[in-house]
Amino acid sequence: MSRNIEELKIQANTIRKDILKMIFNIQSGHLGGSFSMVEMLTALYFDEMHYDPKNPSLKDRDRFILSKGHTAPALYATLANAGYFPKEKLMTSFRRIDSMLQGHPDMKKTPGVEMTSGSLGIGLSAANGMALGNRLQGIDARIYCMMGDGEINEGQIWEAAATASHYRLDNLVAITDVNGLQNDAETKKVKDMLDIAEKFRAFGFHTIEIDGHDFQDIFASLDEARMHKGQPTAIISHTVKGKGVSFMENVVAFHGKTPTKEEYENGMQELRNVM
């Protein structure tokens, strides 16, 4: 593991620029929640996880499940930068009919996508099955599932949490991207989930709270999760929706709003000025 934080920051910035280009190019897509999860994806794919982009079905690969499937732009940009497919596809295939990069992840179309998602609340159940399957087959690999703090309104999440705890799936890490906003309001105004960390703890998870934009925090939590045995781990990742472009940060409209030409140009300029 390289743990070169400066290189990872550069990679994260590249992924944000790719996300913004993709969404502006097709005039469609979910930007705010894609931006908020970039550091976690960067840490996983460019340091933490074991995988081979030339052999996506590698038996002992670690797997990432994007349960909040509407933030597919972040996953696609990450997979392209990791070498799963040419980056040109981000501009020519995203959200086009019958293309390899659908509006929500499709495991039958996109190399590196482990689960077809989009209907919220189902990712953790699938991750449980993968984690338990690996254990039964003696495969030493880890499963990472990314959920949204709006998504955890769904009851199936908590059924899955009880199952993960029951089977003591210590090869599973459930990550909640807590950016405080969902489709049309603050998450607390739609349905207040109160103390999310305490909820997962009550369901039998080893629970860690972090700043989801701080690589040191992220890696400390991933290291702790790997070492902890006998329980699944929940990482509560506190983030900023729209992170990286000042006028998009913490603005609920940018959950699914397409930037205007001026907003795109100003946003790209901010991202170019990061490094």
Image: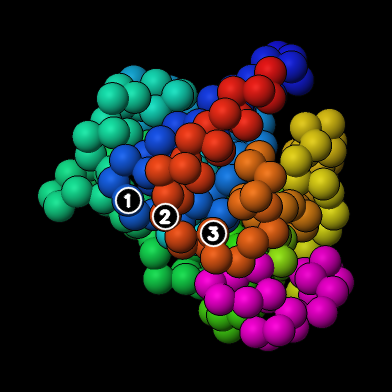
Q: Distance between the residues labelled 1 and 2?
A: 6 Å
Give the labeled residue for mark 2: 258
Residue 183 position, x and y percent, is 53, 72
Residue 179 position, x and y percent, is 70, 60
* Residue 62 visible: no
Residue 254, numbered label: 3
The amino acid marked with disc number 3 is Phe
Q: What stretch is highlighted in magenta?
A: 181-202
The mark total stands at 3
Q: Distance between the residues labelled 1 and 3?
A: 13 Å
Q: Horizontal placement of 79 versus 179: left or right?
A: left
Most foreground residue, 67 or 33: 33
Give the labeled residue for mark 1: 27
User: Per the image, is 193 magenta?
Assistant: yes
Screen quadrant of the C terminus: top right
The relative height of residue 256 versus residue 100 in the rendered view (above or below) is below
The relative height of residue 209 versus residue 267 in the rendered view (above or below) is below
* Residue 4 visible: yes
Q: Horizontal placement of 162 versus 115: left or right?
A: right
